[in-house]
Image: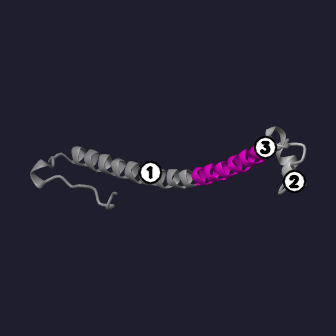
Amino acid sequence: MCSGLPMIPARKELPDDIDALKAMVVAMAEKAARGEALEADVINLTAANADLAALNAAADERIARLTAIIRMFERARYGKSSEKRRLEGLDDEQYVLVFE
């Protein structure tokens, strides 16, 4: 992370020309601005990543729930004594959910 203060070259590396010094200051300011922009991007991307992780977790939960319902239907249809077996535990909302 950036400390907010740009690196200043050693005194003997500084040019004596005013225009060259101005150009160095402008370059250092631009570099600092890019660093701040990158830090903002990291913050935004971290937040977006957290949002996507939550969305992914919700999708995984729904997939697991739907898979369990499908297995229950398959057991009722193909399992032993399927005519005698009742689909206990499924309410009307779950039946609708399967056929969405």
Looking at the rendered structure, the kind of residue marked 3 is Arg
The local secondary structure at tag 1 comes to helix
Precedes in sequence: disc 3 or disc 2: 3
Label disc, if present, on residue 25 of the rendered structure: none
Is residue 42 positioned above or below 74 on the image? below
Mark in front: 1 vs 2:
2
Relative side of 82 to 32, left or right: right
Q: Is residue 7 left or right of residue 30?
A: left
Q: Are marks 1 and 2 in contact (CB under 8 Å)?
A: no
Query: Does residue 70 appear to the left or right of 48 in the view shown?
Result: right
Mark 2, residue position: 93
Residue 74 horizontal side relative to residue 11, left or right: right
Picture coordinates of residue 70 (x, y %)?
A: 77, 43
**Considering the image in quadrants, where does the C terminus appear?**
top right
Please check the rendered image and state whether residue 61 is part of the magenta-colored stretch, yes or no. Answer: yes
Q: Give the range drawn in magenta.
A: 51-72
Residue 10 can be seen in this image? yes
Horizontal and vertical percent for residue 39? Answer: 42, 54
- Location of mark 1 (residue): 37
Q: Which residue does the numbered mark 3 point to in the structure image?
A: 75
